[in-house]
Image (cartoon, coloured by chain):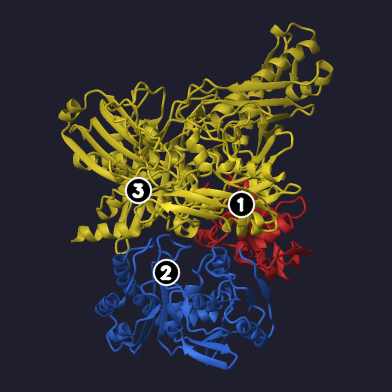
Amino acid sequence: MSKKHVVSATINGDEVEFLCEARDTLLDALRNSLGMTGTKEGCSNGNCGACTVIMNGQPVVSCLVLAMEAEGANLETIEGVACGSELNEIQSAFLEGAALQCGICTPGIIMQAKSLLAANPDPSEQEIRFCLSGNLCRCTGYDKIVRAVQAAAAKKRSVAS
Amino acid sequence: MHAFEYQAPTKLADALALLAQHHGAAKPLAGGTDLIDQMRTGRYSPSLIVDIKKLDELNVLAVADSGLRIGAAVPCHRIKSNVQIQQDYAALYDSSQIIGGWQIQSRASLGGNLCNSGPAGDSIPSMMVLGGACVIAGSNGQREIPVEQFCTGPGKNVLQPGELLVEIRFPRPVARTGSHYRRMIPRNEMDIAVVGVAACVTLNESGDQFADAKIGLAAVAPTPLLATKVSEAIVGQPVNDTTMQNAAEVAKSIVKPITDMRGTAEYRSHVTGVLVKRVLQAAVVRAKGEILDYVPGH
Amino acid sequence: MATVDKPKYKVIGTRPIRHDGVDKVTGRAKYGADIRLTGMLFAATLRSPHSHAKILSIDTSKAEALPGVRAVVTSQDFPEQGDRVVELGEGAANMRHLSANVMARDKVLYKGHVVAAVAADSMHIAEEAAQLIDVQYEPLPPVLDVLQAMQPDSPILNEDIRTESLGASGDDNSQPTNIAMHYLFEKGNLDEGFSQADVIVEREYDTTMVHQGYIEPHNATALWNADGKVTVWMSTQGSFTARQQTAELLRIPVSHVKVVPMEIGGGFGGKISVYLPPVAAMLSKKSGRPVQLVMSRTQVFEATGPTPGSHIKIKIGAKKDGTLVAGDAWLAFEAGAYTGSPVGMACMCVFACYDLPHGRVEGFDVCVNKPRTNAYRAPGSTHVAFAVETAIDELCEKLGVNPLDFRLKNAAKEGTRRVDGPVFPRIGMWETVDAIKQSAHYQTKLDGKFRGRGVASGFWFNAGMKSSVTATVNLDGTVSLVEGSTDIGGSRTGIAMQLAETLGIAAEAVMPTIADTDSVGYTDVTGGSRVTFATGIAAYEAAKDIQRQLVQRAAILWEVDAAQVKYEDGGVVGPANQKISFAELAAQLHETGGAVIGNGTSSAANQGGAFGTHCVDVEVDPELGKVQVLRYTIAQDAGTAIHPSYVEGQMQGGVVQGIGWALNEEYCYDADGRMANPTFLDYRMPTCFDVPMIDTIIVEVPDPQHPYGVRGVGEVPICPPPAAIANAIYDAVGVRMQTLPMSPPKLCKAILAQGN
């Protein structure tokens, strides 16, 4: 077995240390070393977005990040989106708008939508669609996902104002 | 994935030393969006990964009167969100916002796109037409070569074992210059270019003649091409359909596309002509200081 | 829109939040690959690089010697199946073929065909070990084209296949062949029909293999315990068929296998056939440890069950007044490596939207060196809808008839007999066409250069089959509902709503659970658009069972004869007009006799069929051959929409899959039979940025076979899009596309050819 290394990172606000091999991806480390299986694996080559997490403020596909690159990084995953038992406005909008069917793409899409709304509180439909183009959903046809992101954005703006 | 070691040096000299020690068995890692997948599929199996993202020299993003410097590891999201690049080096903005989705752009770099040396690299034609020069460091110091000389074949380039691409430098464009990149893809996003075309044009003072023009082409030859013959057909000519149609015909005559699952050679040649016209028109709009009405993929 | 007057419901037709919703937006929901067991090993497979080859030898010694490797299996480890055909819930399977598909024996029949598997301490070690297995092959010439594979001199894939006939005769059954099935259906007199026709359209069509494209790869985690019992945790559309397939492949009793259905990340028909559980189980048996086996995306593309490519000939004729008089169809479908394409169902669907007096349909199921095909959303119907619905568009053009008026005039309705025999009960084909004709979309003129509008209709049978539920009344006035239908798209809420409606309680007062195969009665697959219909009936029956028991409990409380007590409006009413609500009565269960458990099953009910009509506007870039979908409206008969949001979601999702099939999705093969595009990047399913909002019109013509009139909605929305888009492209640029996908290079070529 290859040598294991210790990586220290901040995940969802907590200081975390985990063991990994140099060849483990961040996705491997989250799911296997840390047991955080909310981040999903759909393709392992960056084409579906199911494994999207936020790394140092930017969305990344964790299947194309080496776990060791996370040393010192600030990571946000789906497990940290809700504030305690209170859902984030995106999560609520997805439930109210029936924006998921099988749900396997949902964690990645929520992370991507969270990145979008942080950068652009009032995105147009086209901006939402462009932003989510790296997240495949095979069930919904995207209609209700786009509407849920619009609804979440409106909710977030109304809370902020 | 095969087993390898990982190092993340913070000094350029240390990175170069690591690369030199491993004689080509070490691979630099910037965004990893190509490399990690290539290691997973077994195309590359380096014994050492040298993460170059902690090197200051490779993270430079500086716009000055003298021009633009982009460190080889600067991710696309920094490039596309830079207002001065959006204004003065618009083709780079165009490329940076369509390389993969946002998640890929958070990591992927122009340096990585160059070093991957894919025929369809979306940023390479843009770098060519903007006059980009690659700054390469090695144990014997630095050298500089034009972007169009960097790639030598599919997946191949001029880097010698132990060398590292440090940054890409661009001259400041003169007045009345505009640039644009677009590609034909079957979907509207998340696709490899069937054909990609970049243009950078400078208009004369009255705006009715091409004072300068450069055309870069992707996915139509073993490497991205700087189409100098197309430039010759444009420079000094009036800004009109005839000139652009002529440029399109010249471009079609110089490409050597292949047939693969992304498109036939015949189709690629045809699309080259269509896109050269459209990209020239778009670059002219920008050269005139007007807003370009353009949605990627459409 | 309520097309037919129906009762006022309290729960049905509302939009409660799905019961599993919070788990799915917080990452807590456990899918198959999320399970972690003590001592669990990770497995990897070795797969064939050839599309057709004999296996000469397999040497696993180097793999077994690698530190960290715990078990290696090849076909030698799996029992022989002989010539067995086993009924597996959704059709019978030749067990020799099924077994060879799970682990190749003497031959590999497609690239990616699995030949060995390894379990090890880590994924990395398992992958390394798999590469150390030495397999010697003798490559054979592959056959990839369905028409070539039908030729007598074609390479033969399976020496044991002879043509079986259904309705056809005269097939030569003496020699091995790639033609596994030959279907023939006839109605009326075809020659007479065409002699009445004033206008005839005759065309040929081709479609390529496409994949379901679910985002979650196949997975299985198995533990073969020391007592001989096997537990499999997996993502599956049908835990009971998975259990039976696994047991049959391992040749152990069905009762020795327990399948625990995890949450499932999409299926669309592709997660019914098993690939991994027997392999993971055998690795577990050899290692004594639980083993997890998950496919890569490339393996999913190369070695699961896509839907076939096809070659289709259509000839249709109509009178000047627009009356359809005759139709002839000839269909050849790729079965893939082993028999089993949906060509039989395609034969039944091809003219099903229409009242066709004279018809003939002939179909062939043909083996080729591609993965064994499997169900994909209305299997076979999209292929034939593309052909017949574009042929009808041509016919309407020649007749000078509006295509919607043509469909209104010729629509199948109650009493119409299909070419293959069955007579339709009450159906809503006409109503969906009418809904599109009245829609805001169709009523709005489309302007602009290179823009066009197309319409098309589609049919799917919808299945009944078997379902079971158990419902336990809780003291706090809620009900715990245990069902066997794995939930791919929110169905547990649709089932819970039907139970709630029947009991007169809130949807939120029902707690649904999807149970393992030891914990609930036999339930067929989540497929065939059957769950909301059939498991809904089971929930209705369970609620009725609870009603009967609660009536008795109230009779005890009131000391009256139970015959004088009835259940109505969410509670029980006695002879002196005493009333007690469901919740009040639930609180007194302990005092009146203990637990109340309602059971419900469904097995006899069959569905009447689902229809949809679509309207699409496109804009074609004529220089690039690229199509943008500008606007899309789907009208579909849902019978009664239980949860309208999830009905709309099925319609929208089906449409977008159909758009992908229409425009870009395809299996590209090189001459050696290797798939050139086995990644999401190059397979090109639609992204969010490729499609517009999908407007939905829910038509409701209740199905009399369901207590609330439900019709399944999952499958039929995929059928019309390729044809509707082809018709829109014609309207935009005057080019008739007869091959799928209508990808830019093909459309561009057609436009340029037209210009010349």
Amino acid at pointer 2: Tyr
Where residue A154 sits: x, y (%)? 61, 56
Asked if both marks, 1 and 3, belong to the same chain, the answer given is no
Q: From the image, tell me which residue sits under label 3.
A: C143
Q: Colour of chain B?
A: blue
Amino acid at pointer 1: Thr
Between tags 3 and 2, which lies in front? 3
In whole angstroms, how far apart are the C-alphas of marks 1 and 3? 40 Å
Q: Colour of chain C?
A: yellow
Q: Colour of chain A?
A: red
Q: Which quadrant of the figure has residue B267?
A: bottom left
Q: Which quadrant of the figure has residue A62?
A: bottom right
Q: In this rendering, is residue C609 above or below C737?
A: above
Where residue C498 sits: x, y (%)? 61, 28
Label 2 marks which chain's residue?
B
Where does the C terminus of chain C fall, quadrant-wise? Answer: bottom left
